[in-house]
Amino acid sequence: SNKDEEVHVCGIQEGDAWSICDFVISNEKRLLSFFPKTREQNLAPDLAKIFATLKSKQFENKIEYLFTIKQQSSRKVIGLIYIKELDKIDG
C-alpha cells in the first residue's frame, strides 16, 4: 500500500494548531457552508493556537471531542471529526 494513503485519527492536541490552520486555509470555501465557526477561528496561526488549546481542553474535560485525521507519513491534518452535544449516561 502507498504510505501517503495511510491515515490515522487521534484527539486534537495543542501542537496541531499550525496544521489545522493550513488545512482550513486550503479548504476555506468548502468549510464556509458547513463549518463557518471552525473556519473563522483558524484563518491565522495565532487564532488556530487559541482554537487548538481550547478544543484540547474541552476534549480533556469531556465537553466536546475534536479528532484530527492525519496522513501517516506527513502528519498533516487532512480532516476533522467533531463529536459534540452528547447525552451522557452515568453508569
Image: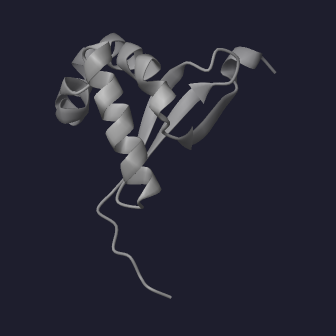
Q: Nearer the viewer, residue 57 or 79?
A: 57
What x and y, as percent, mark residue 27? 33, 16
Q: Is 87 displayed left or right of 78 in the figure?
A: left
Residue beneath the point at 43% across and 52% down: 59
Q: Is 32 displayed left or right of 66 in the figure?
A: left
The reply to whether residue 15 is in sight is yes
Query: Relative to 8, does residue 2 appear above or below in the rendering?
Result: above
What x and y, as percent, mark residue 4? 69, 15
What x and y, as percent, mark residue 41? 22, 27
Q: Is 52 displayed left or right of 3 in the figure?
A: left
The image quadrant of residue 80 is top left
Q: Nearer the viewer, residue 9 or 12?
A: 12
Q: Nearer the viewer, residue 36 or 58?
A: 58
Query: Relative to 32, does residue 45 appear above or below in the rendering?
Result: above
The image quadrant of residue 62 is bottom left
The reply to whether residue 82 is in sight is no
The image quadrant of residue 20 is top left
Outermost residue to the bottom: 91
Residue beneath the point at 41% across and 82% down: 89
Query: Relative to 25, does residue 86 appear above or below in the rendering?
Result: below
Q: How is the image coloured?
A: one colour
Q: How many marks?
A: 0
Outermost residue to the right: 1
Q: Is 4 displayed left or right of 28 in the figure?
A: right
- Quarter the N terminus occupies: top right
Residue beneath the point at 48% across and 39% down: 12
What x and y, as percent, mark residue 60? 46, 54
Residue beneath the point at 35% across and 11% down: 26
